[in-house]
């Protein structure tokens, strides 16, 4: 089925061109690095200007047939060291490592975070010879980045630079790993065992994490361990995978993260559009704002302007449900490959805006790529670049490497995965000061809301009222305070304008529940209902 392009209703999706709050041109320059193959969905670390690249895949987007999806022969079994300054590459095979380590480190969509000299890798999905099947690995592995880089360059043994433990809490692929203070945050993702099947035939089992898993790691001795495990569950707002986790400086100066988009919504196979902030004090869905131009994992760069208290997030290509064509914002629910380079900005009052930048990716590429930041720039502990502390008018913020490239926007939907491949290109990413830059700005405001009365209530029925700015599909979910779904469904017979309904809560045992309305498969609104 070919893509169907749907023009936005202009009344609700306004796009205006305005003076940019991000006064830089983005310049991509390809860099030739000999011996570096195309890879996507890998993990990386870096030390003293050299990169360490582990895992991922050598082919393009996965096939739609179970017997063709994620072939083991296309696992990346080499660990690469890259010196982008000298354009050199060295490599070593994972096959010299113990079985548990070598199988995990050739997987795709691992969760990873570099903490000082240690690169921590969790989970990942691939064919396992030991299991004789595809699986999500339940391992936490630590890697001594400087010593492994030196050993690979020198061609000396590498086994002593790895530690590994196993526990099912680490059986996650397609999530992201971060750190706030001394605590690691394993955010979202899913456990997927067996062979991919687009028809949902029983060739696999899949369980979304729906959670933030928090813990500390002790990597100090000869053995690796974790402690202080805590799990925060929300089956509505944390039901995310294959998204971008953005390190952030919030308006009050606190460091944390933001979940950007991701897939799939519970009631429909479409991306989530609203972000979720993660701080020490909890997680906070930002349902008042939708991000349209980047929906899957891609390369991203995060920069904080302390002078103006603005947090900027750049997104490079990938896959998106929305994109511009000849100045018109289009919707394509097959979520095609795009060339878009976009920006979201959080202002001092917490409001968010999204912009399309005037530059695009050279081709349909960027999905599953990584942005490797320039560590020589001033940056916060969570890798956010300190934009205000850079006085140069042009400077390199880092490099993009790899990802999936495609000659067709709809290659996956059309089952023409032969039109896709892993991209071997490295791009230098430079910012050049441009105080006259104007960019299309998208109004991402949520036009929907609802009220519940009385609230708190002693009744078994509450009155829900809402106004629809246009006629739209409406789904609902009731969730417990511990994040589990109690009931879900579709509300019919709604209309444009004012609507009211009685909502039965007599069957609820809990004193507090959360009612979430999903309007038009894209706008989420959640309210707490309290029973006295």
Image: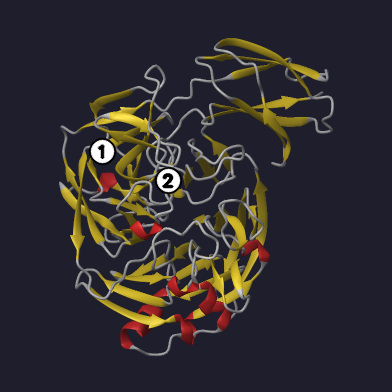
Element at badge 1? Answer: strand
The outermost residue toward the bottom is 156
Quadrant position of the N terminus in the picture: top left
- Vertical placement of residue 216 versus 329, above or below: below
Residue 235 at x, y = what percent?
65, 43
The outermost residue toward the front is 1
Is the C-beta separation of discs 1 and 2 under 8 Å?
no
The outermost residue toward the top is 498
Q: Earlier in the sequence, mark 1 or mark 2?
A: 2
x 59%, y 51%: residue = 199
Task: Kindly tell me whether residue 319 is visible in this rendering.
Answer: yes
Quadrant position of the C terminus in the picture: top right
Check disc 1 and report the residue beneath it. Answer: 357
Residue 231 at x, y = what percent?
66, 52
Residue 233 at x, y = what percent?
66, 46
Q: Is residue 156 left or right of residue 185?
A: left
* Count of numbered marks: 2
Colouring convention used in this rendered image of the protein:
secondary structure
Task: Kindly tell me whether residue 392 is visible in this rendering.
Answer: no
Q: Is residue 291 left or right of residue 32?
A: right
Q: Report crowding for label 1: few under 14, some 14 to 19, many 20 or more residues within 10 A (C-alpha).
A: many
Element at badge 2? Answer: strand
Check disc 2 and report the residue beneath it. Answer: 248
Q: Report crowding for label 2: few under 14, some 14 to 19, many 20 or more residues within 10 A (C-alpha).
A: many
């Amino acid at each position: 089925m070919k893509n169907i392009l749907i023009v936005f209703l202009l009344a609700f999706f306004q796009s205006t061109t305005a003076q940019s709050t991000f006064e830089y041109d983005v310049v991509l320059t390809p860099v030739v690095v000999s011996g570096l193959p195309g890879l996507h969905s890998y993990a990386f670390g870096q030390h003293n200007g050299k990169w360490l690249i582990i895992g991922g895949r050598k082919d393009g987007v996965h096939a739609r047939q179970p017997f063709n999806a994620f072939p083991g022969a296309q696992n990346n079994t080499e660990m690469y060291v890259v010196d982008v300054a000298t354009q050199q590459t060295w490599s070593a095979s994972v096959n010299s490592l113990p079985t548990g380590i070598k199988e995990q480190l050739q997987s795709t969509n691992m969760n990873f975070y570099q903490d000082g000299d240690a690169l921590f890798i969790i989970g990942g999905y691939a064919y396992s010879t030991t299991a004789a099947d595809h699986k999500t690995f339940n391992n936490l592995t630590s890697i001594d980045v400087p010593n492994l880089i030196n050993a690979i360059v020198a061609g000396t043994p590498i086994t002593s630079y790895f530690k590994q433990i196993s526990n099912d809490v680490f059986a996650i692929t397609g999530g992201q790993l971060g750190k706030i203070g001394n605590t690691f945050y394993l955010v979202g993702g899913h456990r997927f065992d067996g062979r991919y099947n687009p028809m949902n035939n029983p060739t696999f089992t899949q369980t979304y994490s729906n959670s933030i898993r928090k813990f500390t790691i002790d990597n100090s001795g000869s053995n690796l361990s974790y402690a202080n495990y805590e799990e925060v569950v929300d089956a509505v707002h944390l039901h995310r995978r294959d998204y971008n986790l953005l390190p952030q400086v919030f308006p009050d100066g606190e460091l944390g993260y933001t979940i950007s988009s991701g897939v799939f919504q519970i009631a429909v196979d479409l991306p989530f559009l609203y972000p979720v902030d993660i701080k020490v004090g909890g997680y906070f869905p930002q349902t008042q704002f939708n991000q349209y131009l980047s929906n899957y994992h891609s390369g991203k760069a995060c920069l904080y302007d302390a002078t103006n208290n603005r947090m900027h997030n750049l997104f490079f290509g990938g896959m998106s449900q929305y994109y511009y064509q000849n100045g018109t914002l289009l919707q394509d629910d097959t979520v095609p490959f795009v060339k878009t380079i976009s920006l979201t900005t959080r202002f001092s009052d917490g409001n968010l805006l999204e912009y399309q930048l005037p530059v695009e990716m050279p081709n349909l590429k960027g999905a599953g790529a990584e942005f490797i930041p320039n560590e020589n720039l001033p940056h916060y502990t969570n890798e956010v670049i300190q934009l205000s502390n850079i006085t140069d008018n042009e400077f390199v913020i880092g490099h993009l490497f790899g990802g999936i490239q495609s000659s067709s926007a709809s290659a996956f939907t059309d089952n023409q995965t032969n039109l896709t491949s892993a991209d071997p290109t490295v791009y230098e990413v430079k910012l050049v000061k441009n105080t006259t830059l104007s960019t299309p700005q998208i109004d991402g405001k949520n036009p929907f809301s609802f009220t519940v009365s009385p609230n708190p209530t002693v009744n078994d029925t509450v009155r829900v009222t809402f106004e629809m700015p246009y006629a739209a599909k409406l789904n609902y979910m009731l969730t417990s305070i511990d994040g589990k779904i109690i009931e879900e469904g579709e509300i019919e017979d709604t209309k444009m304008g004012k609507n009211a309904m009685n909502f039965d809560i007599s069957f609820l045992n809990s004193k507090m529940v959360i009612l979430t309305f999903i309007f038009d498969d894209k706008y989420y609104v959640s309210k707490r209902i309290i029973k006295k």
